[in-house]
Image: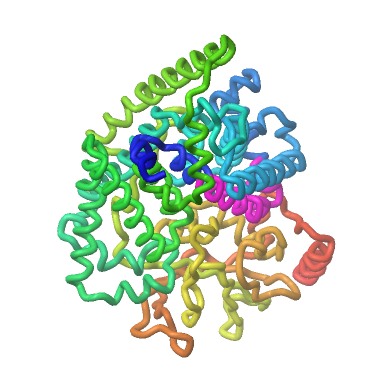
Amino acid sequence: MISQKSDLSSSYNLTRIVVIRYLGFIYFVAFLISLNQNSGLLGSNGLLPAHLHISFLARRLGNISNLSKFLQVPTLLWFCDYNNPVDVDQYLSVFALIGIVISSFVLLTGTANSILMFVLWITYHSIVNVGQSWFSFGWESQLLETGFLAIFFVPFVSLKKFPKNCPPSKVVIWGYRWLIFRIMIGAGLIKIRGDQCWRDLTCMNYHYETQPVPNPIAFYLHKSPEIIHKVETLGNHFVELVAPLFMIVPVRSCRIFAGIVQIMFQVILIISGNLSFLNWLTILPSICFLDDMFLSSLFSDKALKDLYESQKPVLFNRYKRVISKIYNVVQLCLLMLIGYLSIPIVSNLLSSRQLMNSSFDNFRLVNTYGAFGSVTKERTEVIVQGTLSDNPNSQKAEWLEYEFNCKPGRLNRRPCLISPYHYRLDWLMWFAAFQNYQQNPWLVHLAAKFLMNDTEVLGLIAENPFPEQPPNYIRMQHYLYNYAQNGNREENWWTRKLIGEYMPVVSLKELEPILKRQNWPINPKTPTEKTIYKKKKTKTEL
C-alpha cells in the first residue's frame, strides 16, 4: 500500500470526493436560506415580489420566445405562468426544496453525476436571477461558477465514488485553480487601488467594527493593539497578492503551500465575521491544490483499496472508445470556453478601473471578484421604530424598536454567530445605513409591512414589539454605533449616538399611494391581521 501511495501525487480522485461533498454542503446552506427567506423577500407578499420583477423583465425584453428570454436572464420561471404570483411563489419553493434534497444526497454520499450537478446549478440560477437586491452579491456568482465547473468534474451518469475510466477532469482542476487565483488577485488589487487605509495599513483598525454583520469574536479582535492590526493588513496583502503566485509554480510543494495558505486564510475570516457562505465557498477551489497523496490520510484503507481498483486498466470496446472521444471533445470545448470568457476578466484585472463582483456573460460562468475595496470608518445603523399613539409628535408617544436577527440594535444584545447561514434583510440594512431610503425603495415597503403586522416579513426579523396589533406610525432613525469599552452578558456590547432622522414618520394611509404605484399588495396577509387593520382604519377615520 505504501509503494502505491507514490502514484497518488498526480491523482485527484480523493480530491474530487472532498470537493463534491463540500459543494453539496454549500448548496445545502444556500438553498436552505432561500427556502426560509424567499417568501418574505421575493414572494407575492414579500418586499420585492419576484413575479413583478420577472414581468418587468418580460416587458423590457420585448416580444421574444421564452427560450430567448431564458438565454438573456437564465431562470426556469420563464416556462411557468410568471404573471401568476401564486405560481411563482410555488416554483421558488420547489426550486429550493429540490436543491435541498439533491445537495443533501451529495453531502451525505460524497457522490454525484453531471445530471444532479446541472439540476443544482440551474435551479439556483433560477432563484438568483429573480432575486434582485437580495441576491446581488459576489458569492452568488461565485457559487454559480463553482457549480458549473462541478458539472464536468463528475461522471455523467454513474454515482460511484471511484468510477472506472472516469478520472477527474484536469481542465476542471485547473479551472478551479484559475478561479481561486482570480478571487485572491482581484481582491488584493481592488484593495491596493481603492481605499488609502489598505496602503497605510490602517484598514483593520475599522473593519471588525464596521463590517456588515459582526460576530462576538470581532468585538475582541477590534480591541487588539494597532501594531497587530498592521500585521493583519500586511498578512492580508501577502495572502491575496503574493501567495497566489505559488499557485502557478510547477512544483507540487508550492501548490500545496498555496492551497493550505488560502484555506487557513478563509478559516480566519470565518472566525472573525459573518460573511454569509462566501469564505466557506472560497475554500472549495483551494482544495484542488491538494492531491490524493495529501488527502489519503482522511480516507479509510477500504476507500484507498477501491481507488486502486478503479485505476486498473480496462479494455475498451467500441462503445467505450466513442464515449472517451466525446468526453475529450467536451473537455476541450470547456477549456476553450473558459479561455474565451477569461479575456475580459484578465483585461479587467489589469485595468486601473477594475470592477469587482461583475459578470460579462449572462450565465455567470467566469466572473470578476473582490471584497472590501473600501472600508467604512464609522458604523451607522437604521433603527426602525413604531408607536401605537394617535399623535406621533406628542412627547407622550412611546416608540418601540424592531429587533432584527443579527444586525446591531439593542445595545446589550451580543453580536450573533451565524456563518455560513445568512440573513439577507440584515445584510441589506447595513448598505441602507450609508445610503438613504430613496435609494432603497424596499425600505418603504418594509415600513408598510410593519404597519400591517404582515407575518411573512415579520418572519424575517427577531422581535416584533407589537404582537397584538400593528402600530399606527413607523419611523426610522439614524444612529452612529461603536463597540462598548467592555462587552459581556452584564454590560452593553455597543454604544450609540443619534445622528438624525433617516425616514420620516409615516402611517399606512400615507404609504398606500406608493404601494399602489409599485403594485405592492396593501392588504395584510392573514384574516386576523386584516380584521385588525380594518378596525384600526375605522378608528382613524372616526
Is 360 displayed left or right of 199 in the figure?
Answer: right
> What residue is drawn where x is 56% and y is 46%?
24
Please identify the quarter of the rendering in which residue 125 is found: top right
| Residue 102 as seen in the image, left or right of residue 496 | right
> Which of the image's four quarters has the C terminus?
bottom right
* Magenta-colored span: 21-50
User: Which quadrant of the structure image shows residue 354?
Assistant: top left
Frontmost residue, 60 versus 513: 60
Residue furthest to the top in view is 318
In the image, farthest residue toward the bottom: 490
**Residue 523 sits above or below residue 76 on the image:** below
Q: Is residue 359 above or below residue 66?
A: below
Whole-percent x, y for residue 333 in the image: 44, 18
> What type of secondary structure mainly makes up the magenta span?
helix
Location of residue 450 in the rendering, given as x and y in whole percent from the top left corner: 65, 64
Name the spot of residue 520 as percent of width and height, x first.
Answer: 67, 48
Name the residue: 75% across, 70% down: 540
Of the pair 55 and 233, the residue shown nearer to us = 233
Query: Who's the residue at 51% across and 15% down the image?
Result: 326
Q: Does residue 162 show up?
A: yes
Residue at position x 68%, y 72% in the image: 471
Decide: is 165 above or below 186. above
Q: In this rendering, would 374 be left or right of 405?
A: left
Q: Is residue 218 magenta?
A: no
User: Was residue 38 drawn as part of the magenta stretch in this picture?
Assistant: yes
Q: Quadrant of the N terminus?
A: top left
Colour mapping used in the image: rainbow
Camera-side residue of 325 and 472: 325
Residue 306 x, y percent position in the rendering: 53, 39
For residue 503, above or below residue 112 = below
